[in-house]
Image (cartoon, rainbow, N blue to C red):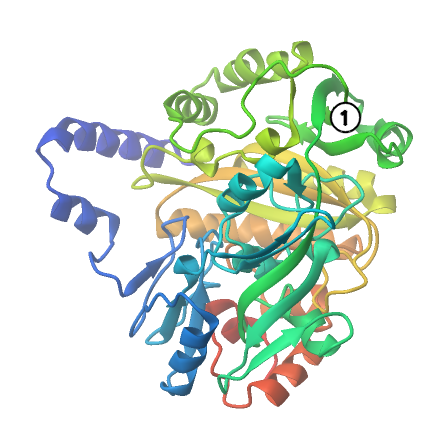
Amino acid sequence: MNDTRIDDDRRRLNRALLAAPFASASLTAMLSGCRDDAQRIEDVSRLEWTDVADAPRPTTTAAVSALLRGDARPVSIGGGRYSMGGQVAWPDSLHLDMRAMRRLVALDVANRRVRVQAGMRWRDLQALIDPHDLSVAIMQSYSNFTVGGSLSVNCHGRYVGRGPLVNSLRALQLVTAEGETLELDRDTHADLFRAVVGGYGGLGVVTEAEFDLEPNTRIVRDAEYVALEDYPAWFRAHVRDDADVVLHNADLVPPRFDRPVAITWRRTDAPVTLSERLIPEDRRYGRDQNLIWAASELPIGEDVRDRKLTRRQLIEHPVVWRNREASLDADALEPRTRLFSTYLLQEYFIPVAQFGEFVAAMRRILIDAQANVLNVSIRHSPADRTSLLSWAPQEVFSFVLYYKQRSHRWADAEAEGWTRRLIDAALDHGGRYYLPYRLHATQEQFLRAYPEAEAYAALKARHDPKRRFRNKLLERYLPR
């Protein structure tokens, strides 16, 4: 990283902090590049924004159908807007903001099944099912995401042996380009079902979804260092086939990314040490944000991370309700401002046998690029045989990069360079990369990672021949 650029950024930050008490809302909007109206669609990174023609917020499936029947413009679809490369928007489109569709449709406690509107957040669902001692089976590590957005990317979390979200999905409701409402499952309209999950909104609007649930149990955390070269064998012996393990990941931290801390949550009958059943939604995260800033900006960042986070994980063994650990808030990862820097994600899915060789390549690339990576979280997934654009066509370890970069075009260009090197490394080791993030891949890399894109494009041509459903991801990469 160029030291002069860093010094310039710090001087700008100091000037902004000094001026903050006198800054008006309009000045703040001007500095951040945000237009203060409902037609500019931004994602969480604040690096990507798109001006759309209109952004209605339907509340029912019938309203979505009416909007599609009554408007011939291209359509884009957004929920929580946690994707980071324009996956939710297209210029001058009719943008369907799904966040008002958050109603519980049906809850079957006895059979542990739930049906909800697609704009509901996982945290809202947790509040509804926790009183019944039920828990979401598969979701991201953080609860802010909408159900529909999670389906569009076929998300996953730390749930051992469960894989992507499609594995807990029973059925979904889809509104097509012509405004027709269809019910999809593994037997009815099976081709659409397979393609819509992980299809990034290219085939229709998901308005409802039905999922299996699981019991809300008490879980205890254990953490230990594992030698990097031993991790796959250690995971197989201690985690993969242990029926009591609910959640697991291993963290690699800078500067060497060579000493994973394996973090495992197992079912237990021990009493809880934290009484909260869910993390309160109004919790403040200033301390967490300061810790992340210090770890990513200060020369003593490695020591700060070790003292304030890693040592506590190794020493403390909290017992909590599963729903509490599943209700983590993404605000804990947010910077106080994205005016000067932004936090981003990338993810790579690597066949189990290629773990060691990919990690060696990844470490070389990150160290050579001096990328400001705060953490690499290692997860696991069995093969996904259901979704068309599967990121796990075979059993994989996933590597989730959480990194920080300056909010400038030159910084994004630098990140594009080392990202493409990482994508090549993943592809060279038989793996794939995840699509919800910055659109740094070349089209050649995309097609190499997802050869099923040809079949997806053919399906889209059949069900959406006028290409009404658009976003920057599909328009950039999908074969015509």
Residue neighbourhood size for the residue with mark 1, other residues' Cα within 10 Å, grouped as few (<14), some (14–19), many (≥20): many
Q: Is residue 230 left or right of residue 73?
A: right
Please indicate, yes or no, whether residue 196 appears anywhere in the rendered image: yes
Q: Quadrant of the C terminus?
A: bottom right
Q: Which residue is mark 1?
A: 266
Residue placed at 71% from the left, 48% from the top?
Answer: 112
Q: Nearer the viewer, residue 208 or 337?
A: 208
Q: Nearer the viewer, residue 139 or 289?
A: 139
Image quarter of residue 327: top right
User: Where in the figure is residue 363, as x and y percent of width and height?
Assistant: 67, 36
Check disc 1 and give the amino acid type.
Arg
Residue placed at 63% from the left, 70% from the top?
Answer: 196
Residue placed at 41% from the left, 67% from the top?
Answer: 89
Q: Quadrant of the N terminus?
A: top left
Image quarter of residue 184: bottom right
Question: Against 312, is 266 above or below?
Answer: below
User: Where in the figure is residue 326, as x and y percent of width and height?
Assistant: 60, 35
How many numbered circles are shown? Answer: 1
User: Where in the figure is residue 208, as x and y percent of width and height?
Assistant: 56, 64
